[in-house]
Amino acid sequence: MLAHCTPWPAPFAARYRRLGYWRGETFTDVLDERVRRHGERLAVVSENRRWTYRDLAMEADRLARGFHALGIRRNDAVVVQLPNCAEFLAVLFALFRLGALPVFALPPHRQFEIGHFCRHAEAVAYVVADRHAGFDYRVLARGVMGQAPSLRHVLVLGEAGEFLALDRLPPWPGELPPPPAADEVAFFQLSGGSTGTPKLIPRTHDDYLYSIRASAEICGLDGDSVFLCVIPAGHNFAMSSPGSIGTLYAGGTVVLCADPSPDAALAWIERERVTIAALVPPLVPVWLDAAARLRPDLSSLKVLQVGGARFDGETARRVVNELGVTLQQVFGMAEGLVNYTRLDDPLDVVLHTQGRPISPDDEVLVVDDDDRPVAEGETGHLLTRGPYTIRGYYRAPEHNARAFTPDGFYRTGDLVRRTPEGNLVVEGRAKDQINRGGEKIAAEEVEHQLLAHAEVVDCAVVAMPDAYLGEKSCAFVIRRHEGVRAPDLVRFLRERGLATYKIPDRIEFVDRFPETGVGKISKKQLRLDIEARLAAA
Ligand code: OOB
């Protein structure tokens, strides 16, 4: 395995192969096989594209040759930050073909995050769109170029400016080197994180394709499936649960929609006869309201998946009643484990649980603070290990020692309970993270940034309830002088290049922090505090 990654111990790897989870199949094999079987079928649709499987494979091949001509080689990391579009998939399959390693940045990431990914993975290239959602990524790329010594190329979808356009890559006339092996790392996902810097998650062809194949089956995908991707295409949910790659695996059609507004998305469903879509919870009421207002023809839509953050039972019921579709709750993580309610589960399970793991070999433990199993049905920390859950983050030995148990279980940081029939219910979170409508914020990361401000003596970032997003972030700050105001701190964070969703939604200045019995800042008390202030207002 790639250096600085933690392989599965040999007996586990042997078991996962013996049981047929790991089949020695790569992403390139999958695409080639689909082209052989049904090259003329529609694979991917987006704003300006309508590609068959053959078109997608040809575009991926052209890009792979271009990347190779530029000197991009096996195990070279490439940060990919594209909006939802067909080209995203072509870039992906091109990099997979070469064994280069995409790092899936999210569209809202800015200089702080991108610079960190580039340096941490020693990325040789950065792929962006020229502009998206009113933001010019070439400006961001200019800033990042000066910050990451390894970075040799910025490749741009659209108007490249001083950079290289994806549609003008030099052609490589010769043979490409052989594709990578299935047990090698294929790419890096990003961790939602709870530490000062975001961690990189190495996923192999073998493990990821297993989760995809099994997910496609659980979600009933086949050649007639049409998947609508409105959440960021590089997020694990959108890619693999079963997501765009699962849809291609099944021979269906992926619709990549760059505009997440419900008006646009509902129009896509009608136009392309979408059969399955994936949403984060805050989008659901917005869709329901838009559907009631616009009355689009949603008769093709069979399954609506909701995941990434807590989904309340009331809204869940509305999905079933108002859209007449099968609801599926998805509780997953980029590190691996994904749980689904099954399509034929009783309504009660679908409305009130987050489902059960993909694999019979997903080991799930619910434990107390000392890693001892709690009584059945009690709430505890969720630990997991299995055929598609990583054993370690990339280049993070110290963090790995805390994030994994000595016998290789990943500490998810989620608090769950298991129902008698084996479904998990997410009851809360022990990790120091804010889940802002599916977008994860590591409190410590924002605190580090705030502490860099000369007027900040100390700070603590916590979640506060929000009617629309479920949670927003609130920073409690002890300042040196009263002159410094919240807008000053917000501007400071923006200038440091922090993604907008991580900028505290609210800043409260205080003189001191409540403490726990052992003298640490009591975030629990701070959460109660902000809740009370919100309720009073
Ligand atoms: C997905 O992946 P990540 O890596 O962005 O975030 C994982 C974390 C989980 O540990 C949990 O804290 C939270 O997000 N989460 C949920 C949830 N789904 C994820 N919390 C409550 N209810 C849910 N249904 O978010 C992700 C990856 C693959 C599929 C779906 C979601």
Image (cartoon, rainbow, N blue to C red):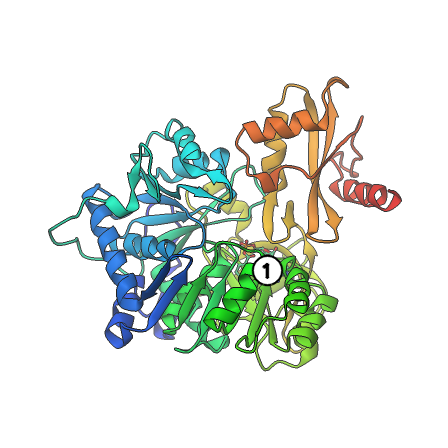
Quadrant where the C terminus is found in the figure: top right
531 relative position to 320: left or right: right
One can see residue 159 in this view: yes
Q: Quadrant of residue 194?
A: top right
Asked whether 38 or 77 is in front, the reply is: 38
Depth check, front residue: 426 or 318: 318
Direction front: furthest residue: 294
Q: In which quarter of the image is ligand 1?
A: bottom right
Q: Quadrant of residue 326?
A: bottom right
User: Would you place residue 387 above or below residue 132 in this image?
Assistant: below
Q: Is residue 358 visible?
A: no
Give left or right: position of 362 versus 458.
left
Q: Which of 35 and 209 is in front in this view?
A: 35
Closest to the observer: 435 or 53?
53
Q: Name the residue under label 1.
A: 262
In the displayed structure image, the side of residue 491 where residue 91 appears, left or right: left
